[in-house]
Amino acid sequence: MSEYALALAPLARRRRVRERSDEELLDAIAAGEDDALGALYDRFGRVAYGVALRVLRDRALAEDAVQEAFLAVWRSAQSYRRERAKPATWILTLVHRRAVDLVRREDRGRSAPLEQAWEPETSSVPEEADLRDRRSSVQAALRQLPADQQQALELAYYGGYTQSELAERLDIPLGTIKSRMFAGLTRLRELVPEQ
């Protein structure tokens, strides 16, 4: 075989892989052909990313979900059953499940108690002590608020939710969320002295 033919062999192989049906690609993946996974990703990667992005609304997390889903395709291609779903449906279901898992993982992180919340690094001991005192004052003041105001403020400021997300999550009208947050912040200003 000539050098030219040897150089073109991988290209011809990739072309043959890309010409396979989705089912054939999944069979090839189950047999351990990594070129087949690349071809399947080329076909479904964009759509998969769109599904993940719609669920997660975060580009980096959507990329993670797609990567994890295609890793699951690689690991479980032998479990694919043609009679149950088309390859596109099976793959996009894996992507959707990974995206939902990431949403749940993020929600668990957002709902961690305040005492476990992330604390920024400070540059000096006096600043660290001042920050700790301020945090204690705010947490003590939050505990004095009515439960509905406390919940709205904690989820917004410590959980990172917008007012619209809170209304949807708590199944409460947006105007009610706004009123609770306004009243809670007004009361916090009274309870926490300015420094």
Image (cartoon, grey):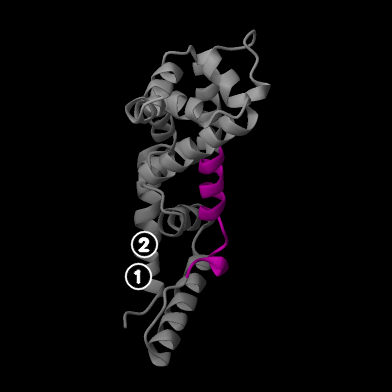
- Neighbor class of circle 2 (other Cα within 10 Å; few <14, some 14-19, many 20+) is some
Instruction: Say which residue appears at 64% left-offset and 7% top-offset.
Output: 83
Instruction: Say which residue appears at 38% left-offset and 87% top-offset.
Output: 127
- Where residue 185 sits, quadrant-wise, is bottom left
Above or below, comparing residue 59 to residue 83 in the picture: below
Above or below, comparing residue 18 to residue 71 in the picture: above
Asked whether 115 or 33 is in front, the reply is 33
Asked whether 146 or 87 is in front, the reply is 87
Q: Secondary structure at mark 2?
A: helix
* Residue 38 is covered by the magenta coloring: no
* Quadrant the C terminus occupies: bottom left
Q: Which residue is mark 2?
A: 185
Above or below, comparing residue 72 to residue 147 in the picture: above
- Residue 107: x %, y % from top left: 53, 47
Farthest front residue in view: 1
Q: Secondary structure at mark 1?
A: helix
Q: Is residue 125 left or right of residue 115?
A: left
Dot 2 and dot 1 residues touching (CB under 8 Å): yes
Q: Amino acid at mark 1?
A: Arg
Instruction: Say which residue appears at 52% left-offset and 23% top-offset.
Output: 91
Q: CA distance from mark 2 to mark 1?
A: 6 Å
Asked whether 174 or 5 is in front, the reply is 5
Farthest top residue in view: 83
Which stretch did the figure color magenta?
101-118
* Quadrant the N terminus occupies: top left
Q: Main secondary structure of the magenta part?
A: helix
